[in-house]
Amino acid sequence: MIKGIGTSGTALIPMMTRLEVIANNLANANTTGFKRDNLFTELLSDAQVKAAQAGGDLSGTLARQYSDFSEGSIQQTNNPLDMAIQGEGFFTVDTPRGVRYTRNGAFTVSREGMLTTKEGYSVLGTNGAVSFPDPQSLAHADIVVTANGEISVDKKPLATLRIANFDNALQLKKEGSSLFILSSGVERRMDPSSNPATVRQGHIEESNVDSIAEMMEMIEITREFESDQKTVQAQDSTLEKALDVGRVQ
């Protein structure tokens, strides 16, 4: 009986984690460049063995979270500082915590002339941070970004975006809503001459979250959660009655 309660209770843990993941996906359905998270659930029997060896700690044994790097829809904005990567690759930005990677190309220019993300992080080119020499005149300047990520202002070459790629995208760990940090492995910079990615100026990549699909899955998991919860309560009630029968008056 106690084993049955433990088995049913264990099944609730990945469901709770999945509900949290879905809720976060839905909250970022309109976040530019956001990549939905998913959950890989291990076999329950293996997880129980690990839990027993770890003294009952189920943390991190039943489910593993990972990001889905499938491409979101590309939307036209006509803003010359908006950029989207079509295909593989990530923009590279410099943050106070170090280099990070993103698919969010909704960029702006700071007062100092630095090309930055909306959070103020500098966008990196192949030779360092991308900087415009005369930011005050950009409103009337002709800013062109080629498919290879080469930036020019009034037909004068300025910089080339540092587009990074990785042999295994799972080497990236999400940080915030649209930034990624390289947890292991090596960054592979794309050669502009053979770049499989295409930079599209005046466009942004939307989130790859399918809100309807996420909502349907949330409803399904909620129902399963409630069913398992009732099973635990029923077994607990039966156990309590059994104890009452054997209790010495």
Image (cartoon, rainbow, N blue to C red):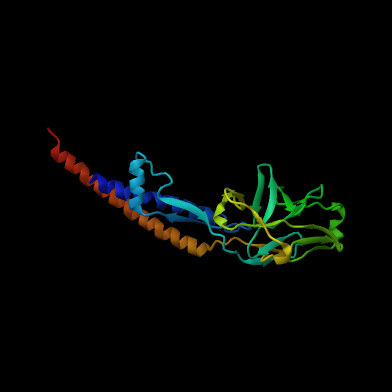
**Is residue 108 or residue 183 the one in the foreground?**
183
Q: Does residue 153 sit above or below 182 in this rendering?
A: below
Residue at the (38%, 44%) spot, across then down: 58
| Left or right placement of residue 77 versus residue 240 in this view | right
- Residue 77 can be seen, yes or no: no
Q: Is residue 243 visible?
A: yes
Q: Quadrant of the C terminus?
A: top left
Dividing the picture into quadrants, the one containing residue 216 is bottom left
Q: Residue furthest top?
A: 249
Tell me the quarter of the picture where residue 217 sits.
bottom left
Looking at the rendered structure, the number of numbered marks drawn on it comes to 0
Percent position of residue 138, x then y: 84, 57
- Answer left or right for 181 relative to 1: right
Q: Quadrant of residue 146?
A: bottom right
In the drawing, does residue 87 fall left or right of residue 67? right
Residue appearing at x 22%, y 46% in the figure: 1
Q: Position of residue 62 (x, y in %)?
A: 40, 50
* Foreground of the two, 7 or 184: 184
In the image, is 219 to the left or to the right of 171? left
| Residue 88, x across and y down, in percent | 63, 63
Q: Position of residue 49 (x, y in %)?
A: 33, 47
